[in-house]
Image: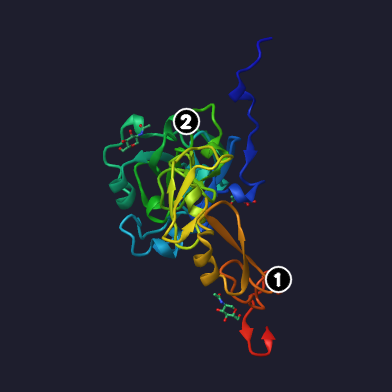
Amino acid sequence: MKTPPFFLMTIFVSCMVRKSLCLTVCSKLVALEWHLDQILVQMNLTLMENTCGTTEDCWGSHGGDDLRAPFNFPQICPLQLQHGDKLVLVTDETLTSYGVSLLNVSKDDFESCSADRLARDQFVFPWRINTREEVESKWLKPGHHYFIALHDKNTQLCKHGLRLNVLVKTQLCQASPLVPLCSGRGICQTDNWEPTYSCRCHHRYSGRFCEKFDPCLDSPCKNKGVCLSSGSAESNHRTYKCLCPPHFTGTTCTEFIGKENCDRLCTNGTCVQVSSGSFTCICGAEFSDPPCERKTTCDPNPCRNGGICEETPAGPV
Ligand SMILES: *[C@@H]1O[C@H](CO)[C@@H](O)[C@H](O)[C@H]1NC(C)=O
Ligand SMILES: *[C@@H]1O[C@H](CO)[C@@H](O)[C@H](O)[C@H]1NC(C)=O
Ligand SMILES: *[C@@H]1O[C@H](CO)[C@@H](O)[C@H](O)[C@H]1NC(C)=O
């Protein structure tokens, strides 16, 4: 027996089992992460549930004044799929026995529920829809798809909300399929209004695929030194250079040039020589980093569980 190609062995996970992967916009999911498994999304084609009537209902409040915010009329909650996901439509018995076809239409025809042209190639299923039908992948290419229900040549059901807008998204998170998403240094994510998935990079990484490491994002240069990054992807060796202001030196501008400068600014600490011309200020226990201001009682933060510490004359609260 021939081994089936890898993609056929991909486990299908039903959207109903893993709720966090269900992608109707009505459920107001703002951010979705790209999943590596293909998902089987099951959608009920019915007027009884998961429908919406206004832009606000269908797309969430932040769609309100957005120009991309579509369609203020009854419809099934808009669906967002990851490219490659499977879509199964489950239609209730009332509708299947009444006889309903599903038609692929343009955005305008979706809005007006018109089916004037009625060409054979518009029918998503060759016959009337059955209780359970898988939508062929040719209808689920990346982009917006508009499907309306039709009974004979009548579009009343569509006007009542039996129409579905599906947005299929690809990801732009890899330079090649062989490298990890976002170079392993970010999350491949999308939200309602984005047409694709893209990288949200972890701290200090940047670039379309989080391939750039920016050591300057942490402001490593002290005393108002200017950080210059070499933009290398390697995080394990220093790839920045600090341009220090007058009187300061050292890789992160924490050392003083000459003992006079150190003595002048390090009044609460002790000046220690580190090289022929440079000195460093060692602060006492109750002082914070050079130039040794008295530690606030909130530093380090004594509040547990992320509490916010506030200074008062009586101590921290
Ligand atoms: C679809 O309908 C079934 C049966 O009515 C219900 O149990 C299920 O929760 C529905 N699924 C969704 C995603 O709404
Ligand atoms: C679905 O309809 C749209 C608008 O008429 C059309 O551009 C698109 O090619 C159709 N999709 C398929 C798979 O035929
Ligand atoms: C030294 O400590 C005092 C008392 O905390 C503080 O007021 C002063 O600003 C500190 N001096 C410097 C140079 O930070």
Residue at coordinates 44% horizontally, 56% vertically from top-left? 244
Give the percent coordinates (x, y) of residue 88. 55, 38
Distance from the alpha carbon under mark 1 to that under mark 2: 67 Å
Q: Residue drawn 43% across and 44% down?
A: 167
Query: In the current view of this chain or complex, which residue is farthest to the top?
Result: 1
Question: Picture quarter containing residue 292?
Answer: bottom right
Looking at the rendered structure, the secondary structure element under dot 2 is helix
Residue 51 to residue 210: above or below: below
Q: Mark 2 points at which residue?
A: 137
| Quadrant in which residue 8 is drawn | top right
What kind of residue is marked 1?
Ala
User: What colour scheme was applied to this rendering of the protein?
Assistant: rainbow
Q: Quadrant of the C terminus?
A: bottom right
Say the numbered circle drawn on residue 99. Answer: none
Tell me: residue 317, above or below residue 187.
Answer: below
Which one is nearer the viewer's eye here, 28 or 254?
A: 254
- Viewer-proximal residue among 206 and 116: 206
Q: Which residue type does callout 2 highlight?
A: Ser
Quadrant field for ligand 2 = top left
Judge the density around disc 2: few (<14), some (14-19), many (≥20) Cα neighbours within 10 Å.
few
Looking at the image, tell me whether mark 1 or mark 2 is earlier in sequence order: 2
Residue pointed to by mark 1: 285
